[in-house]
């Protein structure tokens, strides 16, 4: 299944395997998770 990089920049890359464009809430959730200290 192909993935795409999410439309924002973080210190760590974030990829999405969703088969639809991400909504504002989904993007916000991904940003919040990517900023957690245990994400590598």
Image: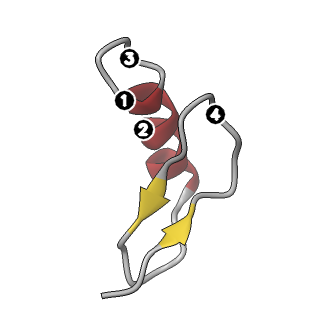
Residue at 34% in and 26% down: 39
Q: CA distance from mark 1 to mark 4?
A: 12 Å
Is 11 positioned to the left or the right of 2 in the image? right
Residue of label 4? 10
Give residue 29's quadrant in the image: top left
- Front residue of 18/9: it is 9
User: Would you call the spot at circle 1 few (<14 residues within 10 Å), some (14-19), or many (20 or more)?
Assistant: few
Q: Are marks 3 and 2 in contact (CB under 8 Å)?
A: no
Residue of label 1? 40
Q: CA distance from mark 3 to mark 1?
A: 9 Å
Query: Judging from the image, what secondary structure is the residue with disc 4 in?
Result: loop
Query: Judging from the image, what secondary structure is the residue with disc 3 in?
Result: loop
Q: CA distance from mark 4 to mark 3?
A: 11 Å
Disc ID at residue 29: 2
Residue at 62% in and 28% down: 11
Indicate the position of residue 36 as horizontal and vertical percent values.
38, 17
Q: Earlier in the sequence, mark 2 or mark 4?
A: 4
Q: Earlier in the sequence, mark 1 or mark 4?
A: 4
Residue at 45% in and 81% down: 20
- Front residue of 24/7: it is 7
Is 8 positioned to the left or the right of 18 in the image? right
Q: Is residue 5 above or below residue 28?
A: below
Residue of label 3? 36
Q: Is residue 37 above or below residue 16?
A: above
């Amino acid at each position: 299944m192909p993935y795409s990089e999410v439309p924002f920049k973080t210190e760590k890359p974030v990829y999405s395997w969703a088969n639809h464009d991400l909504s504002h809430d989904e993007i916000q959730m991904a940003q919040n998770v990517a900023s957690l200290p245990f994400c590598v």
